[in-house]
Amino acid sequence: MIKFCGWLKSYNDLKETDTTNYSKVSIKWNEKIISIIVVAIPCILNFYSMVHSAKFGLKQTIIFDIIGLLVLIPLFYCHELLHCISYSNEEEKCIYVYQASLLTYCTEKVNKKQMMKILLFPNMVITLPIAFLSLFLTLFLKYEISSIISFIFILVIAGAYSDIAMFISILKYNNNAYFCFSKGIFYVNNSER
């Protein structure tokens, strides 16, 4: 069952999972740098495209940015819904508003392959199509539309950073590893099952 659970004040308010035989997943510096590069390259290309196509004034820019932000709200919610449907139906899945973004939380313990699917699925369905739109359609669309698409993509890909960082960090674990979240912390059981 998927529920919208409202505002989350602290990770301490989240449901706790039994993490016996689990350890915290550590995201190393090199994994963070790789994730930043994966996020930064398309963001820089889109920012260049957005600035290069910007042939309108400040008032229009603000209007287009507001339109972009209004489009982003349902996109972010869809992104979190796709995370939720990637889990099985065994555990409750909650979507929270946390700080300036949305957060999916589920305490289900999943294998490596399933966790990779959970992390990548929303990015394959939402982020990649927007990437292609923003990078290739700027040549064919009016400046206003291409600027809005580029702005949306920059925010969507920046929002996908944590998914990408977690995905890269779990690659180092064996294929029999199991993962879970408890109180907002990412855990792994890397022993053979």
Image: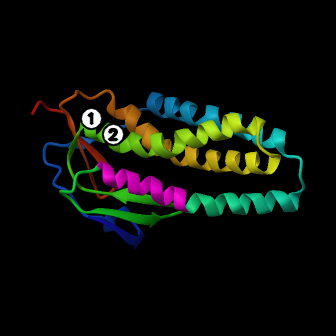
Q: Position of residue 130 (x, y in %)?
A: 59, 43
Q: How is the image coloured?
A: rainbow
Residue at (42, 58) in percent of width and height: 103
Q: Residues within 10 Å of mark 2 (few under 14, many from 20)?
A: some
Span of residues in magenta: 74-86
| Residue type, mark 2 in image | Lys
Q: Residues within 10 Å of mark 1 (few under 14, many from 20)?
A: some
**Outermost residue to the left:** 193
Residue designated by label 1? 113
Q: Report if the CB atoms under discs 1 and 2 are less than 8 Å apart.
A: yes
Query: In the visual, does 90 lie left or right of 41?
Result: left
The answer to which quarter of the image holds residue 59 is bottom right
Q: Position of residue 73 (x, y in %)?
A: 56, 62
Query: In the visual, does 76 lie left or right of 108?
Result: right
Query: In the visual, does 24 lie left or right of 61?
Result: left
**Outermost residue to the bottom:** 6
| Residue type, mark 1 in image | Lys
Q: Position of residue 20 (x, y in %)?
A: 13, 48
Q: Is residue 29 magenta?
A: no
Helix, strand or loop at disc 2?
A: helix
Helix, strand or loop at disc 1?
A: helix
Residue designated by label 2? 117
Spatial separation of the CA atoms under disc 1 and disc 2: 6 Å
Instruction: Considering the whole magenta stretch, tell me its main secondary structure.
Output: helix
